[in-house]
Image (cartoon, helix red, strand yellow):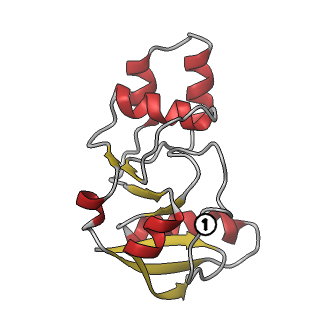
Amino acid sequence: MIVYHGSYLEIPKPDIKHSRLNVDFGRGFYTTPIYGQAEKWCGKFKRRGGKGVISCYEFDERAYQEQKVQIFQSYSEEWLDFILACRQGKDASDYEIVVGGVANDKVFNTVELYFDNLIDKTEAIKRLRYEKPNLQICFRTKAVIEKYLHFEGSKEV
């Protein structure tokens, strides 16, 4: 499967040491099989006057059978609980790859409302959904990146 990563530079050798903590699926290298989504990820760099670069990789899907993987098939309470744990720095799981939907740009407001008990989980999940289809694949270990993700090239957008 071809996957994409949107950034401000080409990333021929992905790693997790440069990734941010406390994001949707925790520290890792984030990709998507949806080109338009990677292009959108580049938008924040372009808005700041930088450039947008989409790096392309061949992802060996044997990883799904050979590694410890969590796949969220839908926006669910399990998905929300996992995102909340990761965003709070409380994720203790040992998943090497996590796959699922992206929490939208309103996530901080929604999470705050949920933590303040102003909305319940059902309402939080509803608010966090994108209207457009999306998918992110987070590679959480160096070994998985090196074995299953192979750089194919990049394109400035």
Where does residue 110 sit, x and y in percent of width and height? 56, 28
| 100 vs 46, nearest the viewer | 100
Determine whether the residue tagged by mark 1 lies in a helix, strand or loop.
Answer: helix
Q: How many marks?
A: 1
Q: Is residue 19 left or right of residue 118?
A: right
Q: Residue at x 37, y 54 (%)?
A: 134
83 up-or-down from 17: above or below: above
Q: Residue at x 37, y 55 (%)?
A: 135
Question: 10 Å neighbourhood of mark 1: few (<14), some, or many (≥20)?
Answer: many
Q: Residue at x 46, y 34 (%)?
A: 82
| 148 vs 72, nearest the viewer | 148
| 133 vs 11, nearest the viewer | 11
What is the three-letter code of the residue carrying label 1? Gly
Q: Is residue 10 left or right of residue 122?
A: right
In which quadrant of the rendered view does residue 23 lie?
Answer: top right
Q: Which residue is mark 1?
A: 43
Look at the image and tell me in which quarter the N terminus lies.
bottom left
Q: Residue at x 55, y 57 (%)?
A: 28
